[in-house]
Image (tube, rainbow, N blue to C red):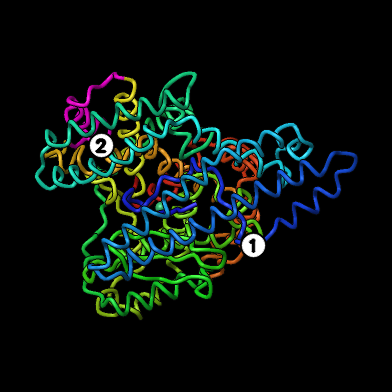
Amino acid sequence: MAAYFCSEASEISNTNAGGGAGWKAGVQPIASRAILQTIAAMPTTAFTSAYDSLCHHVSQTALLTSIENVLCWDERTQMPPEAGPYRAVQRSFLAGEIHRRRTDPRLGEWLAILADSPLATDPYSDAGATIRWIQRGYEKQKKLPQSLVEELAETASQAEQVWSEAHKANSFATFQPLLERMIELKKQQAAAYGYNKTPYDPLLDDFEPDATADDIQIILTDLAEELVPLVRAIDRSARQPDINILWQPCSIGAQDVFNRSIAEAIGYSFAAGRLDTTHHPFTVTLGPQDTRITTRYDEHFMPSALFSTLHEVGHALYEQGLPDEHFGLPLGEFVSLGIHESQSRLWENLVGRSRPFWEYLFPAAQDAFPDALGNETLDSFYFAINSVQPSFIRVEADEVTYNLHILIRFELEQAMLTGDLVVADLPGAWNEKYAAYLGIEPPNDSDGCLQDVHWAAGLIGYFPTYALGNLYAAQFYAQAQADLKDLGSLLSRGEFAPLLEWLRSNIYQHGQRYTASELVLRATGRPLSHEALLTSLRTKLGPLYSV
Ligand code: ZN
């Protein structure tokens, strides 16, 4: 499946509903054959044949999506501007072929044969998990009428353009009719999928399979109850960092060398990837052994590229750690966007903003940027990169307030979908929530409800995956600390391999064998909660801000 990971929706394709991609071209599912051969006394011919056909078909689709990813990567990093129109034709052609293959009625026939077969009995076996996830994606996709799929795509394309203009002109009225149309279509999409409790659930499920609005509401509300007073206390604290030390000239060349060395030290393989520059950083996998990352440099603000590189490296380590032999099939795919985001946040925030990490790296940073950091101390640098300050813009938010930006969007998009909030009232509702949760009120809609492209793009139910990423990351990290005993001292010596190995064995290697909630339970021994994130933030920020 085509997938981009980053913190801005314009870089992320909405693909998780596709349900699996496939094996490498021409490679038959040898491992699956071995499993099949062990199942005695069954009409293996029919099952084997259906399973092989299913895997082969899905593998060929993955071949096409990997080609699509090559085109996307090229478009965002290398392509000359005048190549745009023909590139659009190429991509549209491929998108059509991929959609046709994903809705091929033969998928339904093979899945029907396999549904009651011994292959599907154990949902955690290679074959069982593969069948389960392909079935899941196929069932959802086929519920959507072709006309609705086309209208959603067309409206999104139009709404994104109008949003871009409205954002520049600070004109919500311009965007309002398009957003109204999009919400209406998303209601239709939810109705076509079907749901028990709220239309939000099946939309959320496209990005975070099996999660529900109720789950998210409980966990984010619990978190907010603790974070809101924490943010207020930090705001009132007499101890504040000097963030000006981060705003100093650092040559792009020196930043590039420094960031590459960190990426490599952490475990990113440049033999199976690349680092390039782009406008909005993203990560993309073009095939087994080819996961590429991107960043953007600001000559006057070194942390921008540094933390964006750490973020994308986190996504890439997950991709590089998925089993190659299952590339394109569910066992070789990431489990959910929330889990994917947890890996980027873990390296960006839990490791990258930790004191042990900078005990190791700060001398090297001073060598790399002598004019900017030569006379600074580790303490002042560490405090500055952990600065907390309520702000209007989500993508610029710190580790604490970020989650409140998400809660606001989650509550508002649900309310629009259920009809509790009419689109015309969005700007006022937005500002009220910013006042309530962050104690600030946006000066205009461009810095308020017009700041994100997600709703224009039809990505309703996407925002929670960012906060889930933070929550999963903290819980995984706390468990890794418990299991590895002296993780802090390992990091302070630049020894990242034990943590990476923990992540590989507890998360990466499983692909989609387990759901996100099963994975968290297996890896940490308890269901997801807000506790680990809160503890981590309090432990770090308490001493810094004396709160
Ligand atoms: Zn990300």
- Say left or right for 527 vs 345: right
Image quarter of residue 465 = top left
Task: Please state the horizontal and vertical placement of residue 112, each as a whole percent of the image.
Answer: 67, 33
Q: Is residue 432 magenta?
A: yes
Image quarter of residue 468 = top left
Look at the picture and state if 218 lies above or below 276: above
Which residue is painted at 23% across and 28% down in the image? Answer: 180
First of labels 2, 1 by sequence position: 1
Viewer-nearest of discs 2 and 1 = 1
Which residue is painted at 50% across and 33% down in the image? Answer: 142
In this figure, which residue is indicated by the disc labeled 1? 26
Image: magenta residue range: 419-440
Which label belongs to residue 438? 2
Q: Is residue 380 magenta?
A: no
Task: Please state the horizontal and vertical placement of residue 105, each as a whole percent of the image.
Answer: 57, 38
Task: Please state the horizontal and vertical placement of residue 374, each as a whole percent of the image.
Answer: 29, 78
Element on which disc 2 rests: helix
Q: Nearer the viewer, residue 225 or 123?
A: 123
